[in-house]
Image (tube, coloured by chain):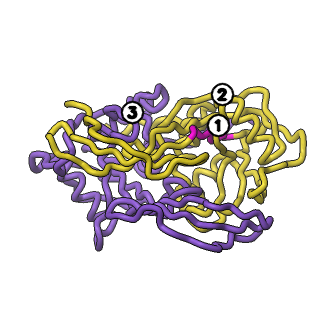
Chain colours: A purple, B yellow
Amino acid sequence: MKSWEILESEYVVKDRWIGLRADTCRTSHGHVLDPYYVLEYSDWVHVVAFDADFRVLLVRLYRHGVGEFTTEIPSGRIDEGETPIETAKRELLEETGHASDRIIHLGGLTPNAATHTNRSHPLVAYDCRKIAEPNPAGEEEIETLWVEAEELLKWIDDGRFYHSLQIAGILMAFRHAGLLSFVRPPA
Amino acid sequence: MKSWEILESEYVVKDRWIGLRADTCRTSHGHVLDPYYVLEYSDWVHVVAFDADFRVLLVRLYRHGVGEFTTEIPSGRIDEGETPIETAKRELLEETGHASDRIIHLGGLTPNAATHTNRSHPLVAYDCRKIAEPNPAGEEEIETLWVEAEELLKWIDDGRFYHSLQIAGILMAFRHAGLLSFVRPPA
């Protein structure tokens, strides 16, 4: 198996938040794809923030992609020079006024291997406590709420929590916290 | 809390595979975002395909977004007029030559609530069996492999399997199959 070869590449859009690149590619079978679109964003963090009782801190806000108010975990864009843990701390404080002394970076996932060049970083924050009032960025109006860990899994099952990137982070964080265990299938 | 108001909207790109819309939005706080980019794609499916022993069917292929060969579950774009189950059947057959008599649609997630209008549908397929040789679409060169369910969770933990949309589907499918159970945290 071989990688695709990039014959030409140009930016259709390139600004502060997004780059949309149109590549002309030759596949290993010799097919030419013209254009194949690739999205360039900064990396993102998604934070599963537990309190001491393993409740999960959620935010509710308007999301213009889906055009709905969604229930999510705190998240945000990694600024220039920040580590994922620094961004997680900043977003947790800005969006919810909470802090944690134990934030762990669980990996760098692809939001979509076919279309995105950036990474989405799930993190888990333990023993979160409120230290300030939320102070979200200008365009954001954010409510916070707590949910029991088991209840959040039900919300995923029934579609009340439906953000893919964050569900991936919840699986990884719940496993890190020992809240999800593998059950061997019947022989 | 209020939705954002769309003041103006235009397509930067609109073709067969992708629509990139630039909206001018007024947030509930009165901030004007100009432009706010929104991505329009068809819906997608991601299929967790088990054999009778609850091994999971994987595919390996080149993905130009990340520029790497990735290990994934079978997936694809929902064609006009297809249901998610029909697409899952078609992609499973095309990419791997496998079929299942029991495919269950687990929901319609958002790939990214902030940026995408479409949905990503996780499905679970039980008792998959090989009925034909794979016959993937023109640009795709695909290897198939099987992995034990528990091993796949380890691949997620250690970053060998890192596709967010598909990890979300794996959480939902493993819970549907009874392979992941909630462990109550210590009181």
Left or right: where B77 falls relative to B127: left
User: Is any part of residue A174 visible from this angle?
Assistant: no
Q: CA distance from mark 2 to mark 3?
A: 28 Å
Q: Amino acid at mark 2?
A: Thr
**Pointer 1 and pointer 2: residues touching (CB < 8 Å)?**
yes
Q: Vertical placement of A18 versus A9: above or below? A: above
Residue at point 47%, 35% (across, down)? B182
Q: Amino acid at mark 3?
A: Leu
| Label 2 sits on residue | B83
Residue at point 66%, 40% (across, down)? B47
The tag earlier along the polypeptide, 1 or 2, is 1
| Label 3 sits on residue | A152
Q: Amino acid at mark 1?
A: Ile
Q: Which residues are magenta?
A: B42-48
| Label 1 sits on residue | B78
**Pointer 2 and pointer 3: residues touching (CB < 8 Å)?**
no
Q: Looking at the picture, how far across and down is residue A172, in whole percent?
A: 46, 50
Residue at point 29%, 71% (across, down)? A80
Q: Looking at the picture, how far across and down is residue A12, in whole percent?
A: 47, 62
Toward the viewer: B179 or A141? A141
State whether discs 1 and 2 lie on one chain: yes
